[in-house]
Image (cartoon, grey):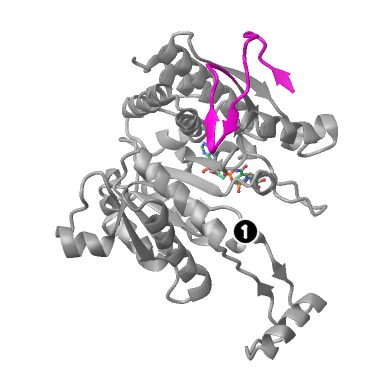
Amino acid sequence: MTMDTKKTSASKITYSKGKISVPHNVLIPYIEGDGIGPDISKATLKVLNAAVEKAYKGEKNISWIEVLAGEKAFASTKEWLPKETLDTIREMKVAIKGPLTTPTGGGIRSLNVTLRQVFDLYACVRPVRYFEGVASPMKEPQKLNVVIFRENIEDVYSGIEFQEGTKEARSVIDYLRSLGHEIRYDSGIGIKPISEFRSKRLVKKAIEYAIKHGRKSVTLVHKGNIMKFTEGAFRQWGYELAKTEFPKETIFEDEVYSKYHGKTPSGQVQINDRIADNMFQQLITRPSEYSVIATTNLNGDYLSDACAAQVGGLGIAPGGNIGDEIAIFEATHGTAPKYANQDKVNPGSMILSGVMMLEYLGWDSAGKLVENAFETTIKQKRVTYDLERHMQGATLLKTSEFADAIIENMKT
Ligand code: NAP
């Protein structure tokens, strides 16, 4: 663990009664990441520091603590995810990370999945918006501006599977046959648990977000027409939660049409639902009708990448894994090892994840500074190789130069 000791008065975030409290000089752990991780982490920290300095003129500050994970951790401790790293994140409550290699062989689980499960980071949050100038396959990519809340713990992520031909698969099949289900013995079996508790807390987070950010709707996306007691139940629990916990702040779509001619009364968030396959085409044909999406794990997995593709790709898609007490923000792409240490790749995904982190801390002015400067830099066509190759007349920048250009464009 390496600590930025410039400011001695730095202190921890605290949590009480469902809320975090952030000191002016806050300790935040970061995981550098493998492959391109060091390049993009360096760029990200530099941009975030500059934004905080510019926005608060020394009144606020982030004191970074490096915690080890992945290859760097293994090289020095022989552990991929040392206990000290977990303890520090648990204590500090908010962290940011670069991508980590999933070690192959030896039955080691994905470090990313482990982090989500250890800290019960049940909402995978992915804002997707367009930045002018980025090449997109859509005619009007700017019409898509959604925030996806994807359940992060259960559904297919629970990882309960039985391989075809094993004793376990056989006994599950025998049990299901005893209930009258015709299942072939040469089947592999996967279990898809979806609970009321976990569905409701995810939908609650999405609605809270919509209220806080003045978003117009929350759409529950499910495949309930086919899987009634999992996906269908998710939909039903979502509506129940809205009705019981946010009776004044939310209104259901049918009421909007029956009483208000299809126009949501101001100050209320419309709750509606769409079947997943329909939602994929709706997001292409009617993107501006959607705002916040709350969905189960597998639907969310597909939707997040499909939406990112619509606005120009995963290279600049940010993400956060958020629980009640702890949150980890991260680049959504992988370690791209062939570009490691070349100062070449786009740090955008991690920088925009940093913007999410600043907003989560309640440091919105600093977050806005970064987002606006990022937008300006792309409009100026000063970009890294991935965007440059699709942009006419662009200036090719290195990772570090792109970060400097963003800082240069920060206007208070
Ligand atoms: P990847 O690392 O995301 O790279 C795939 C391709 O995406 C790269 O070759 C590059 O495309 C492009 N790319 C990724 N990040 C970029 C960036 N910042 N700027 C510009 N282009 C970028 O996917 P992968 O090769 O499948 O996975 C490599 C490793 O990362 C694996 O060990 C995997 O387990 C891990 N991984 C980690 C996370 C995570 O930590 N959250 C997520 C996904 C994967 P071009 O070649 O076209 O330039």
54 up-or-down from 358: above or below: above
Percent of width and height locating residue 77 = 84, 32
Q: Residue at x 58, y 22 (%)?
A: 42
**Assess mark 1: CB under 8 A from ligand 1?**
no
172 up-or-down from 396: above or below: below
- The residue closer to the viewer here, 375 or 356, is 356
- Left or right, 382 with respect to 401, comes to left
* Magenta segment includes 16: yes
Whereabouts is ligand 1, in terms of quadrant? top right
**Residue highlighted by disc 1:** 157
Residue 391 sits in quarter: top left
In the rendered image, the residue lying farthest to the left is 261
- Left or right, 357 with respect to 286, comes to right
Q: What is the magenta range? A: 1-26
Q: Residue at x 33, y 63 (%)?
A: 281
Dominant SS in magenta: loop
Q: Is residue 308 visible?
A: no
Q: Is residue 275 visible?
A: yes
Screen quadrant of the C terminus:
top left
The residue type indicated by label 1 comes to: Tyr
Q: Residue at x 60, y 40 (%)?
A: 336
* Magenta segment includes 272: no
Screen quadrant of the N terminus:
top right
400 up-or-down from 208: above or below: above
Percent of width and height locating residue 400 = 52, 21
